[in-house]
Image (cartoon, rainbow, N blue to C red):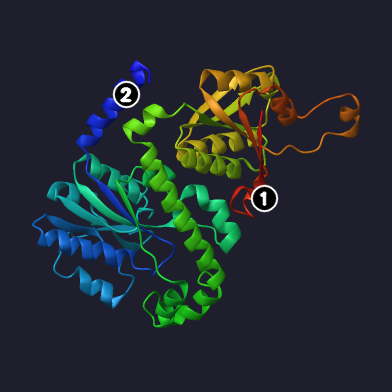
Amino acid sequence: MAANEKALSFLQLIRRSHRGKLKVYLGYGPGVGKTWQMLVEGHRLKQEGLDVVVGLVETHGREETAKLVEGLEVVPRRQVQYHGITIEDMDLGAVLARKPEVALVDELAHSNVPGSENAKRYQDVQDLLAAGIHVISTLNVQHLESLYDTIESLVGVKVHERLPDSVLAEADEVVNVDLAPEDLQQRLREGKVYPRERVPTALENFFRRVNLDELRELTLRELASQIDFKRRREPDEEQRMVPDQVMVCLSSRGPNSAALLRYGSRLAGRLSRDWYAVYIQTPREEPTVIDAATQRYLSDTLTLANLLGALVFTFKGEDIVDTILHFAREYRVGHIVVGRPGPLPAWKRWLGRKTIVERLIVKARGLTIVVVDPKAETEKTGASSLQQRPS
């Protein structure tokens, strides 16, 4: 490890030593018992003499959950007027001023009321951690940003409340709250998850057995990935690892850039590596040349890359393949992720032309080129939807 990397690692250790610890109860759907387990732990910590408060708990009308809140100090919520409606949300300032040892903050991926200091609740939690307050929170696996396309394909739901995978990766402890799908369906029928009038629709849609099985498997995979990630972050392990970063190649007109970025994010997570999202700007794609719609699309793509935790670069180059390989050498990239190219016209084939991906595979040496079919990625999980081609 280089001297500057050691210095950065030590600086991160210093900063983290002043931060609170984050524990997340992770589940595969509403009603598995995440909030219940969080509250049970809150009572246990209080009995051990720790100063515990409820920053915010969502009971969703569940009497058993509401009863479990009793006996814990609850920081009053703030009330906000929005479009003539009174909305209650966590009072971040009040929790910071109270400065407990431990704060219980439910639903980590929740969006705050417009006009709040932070747009998302996970950002409130980050402020609490920075203030030295330990936080216990809850999260469903479908709210991870990188799983957006997978969840939409498997379950048919567009998840609007999402958070960067890095938030969960930085948690000090992740606990899987598991429940057999048939038991969860029974809890739903008994009115312990949603009001009874919503039960038939829920059973026919999100809570179908096939959906619950898929979500449960995704949760177990995510937990395994988190365990492996934390193991790899151990100092002794880190020193033995050869740098092998991940690079995702972006196009200004790529129709599936979001799916490609989410795949790259999860690949980097599995490998426990930094990752880069790189857009190569050729002379034909100068800002003065491409149209406004393409510029907006590219801007949205790079914003998503930032949200997913990538280091984003825009490089200028005459030759896309040469520029990609130059970047890979300079930034110690071992895996280059590219989208599956469309077919070349027959006349270009006749002239001996090759796609960018084909040229990349030929010229890359010692690198793994991962060719992803983004459309297939939304239909499948696992490696069957891609081709890995080590050069």
Residue 54 position in % (x across, y down)? 20, 59
Residue name at image x 39 percent, y 83 percent: 190
Residue name at image x 21 percent, y 61 percent: 41
Assess disc 2: are there few (<14), some (14-19) or many (≥20) residues with their C-alpha within 10 Å of its C-alpha. Answer: few
> Can you say whether 382 is above or below 205 in the image?
above
In-front residue for pair 348/316:
348
Q: Which mark is residue 30?
A: none
Q: In which quarter of the view is residue 32 placed?
A: bottom left
Residue name at image x 14 percent, y 51 percent: 100
Q: Looking at the image, can residue 161 be seen?
A: no
Q: In which quarter of the view is residue 130 placed?
A: top left
Decide which of tag 1 and tag 2 comes sooner along the chain. 2
In-front residue for pair 136/180:
180
Q: In which quarter of the view is residue 143 placed?
A: bottom left
> Can you say whether 379 is above or below 362 in the image?
below
- Residue holding disc 1: 376
The answer to whether the residue labelled 1 contacts the one labelled 2, judged by CB atoms less than 8 Å apart, is no
Instruction: Measure how far apart labels 1 and 2 are at the Cα level.
Output: 39 Å
Type of the residue with mark 1: Ala
Total tally of numbered discs in the picture: 2
Assign the N terminus to one quadrant of the image: top left
Is residue 19 rendered to the left or right of residue 269? left
SS class of the residue under badge 1? Answer: helix
> Can you say whether 208 is above or below 385 in the image?
below
Q: Looking at the image, can residue 36 be seen?
A: yes
- Residue holding disc 2: 8
SS class of the residue under badge 2? Answer: helix
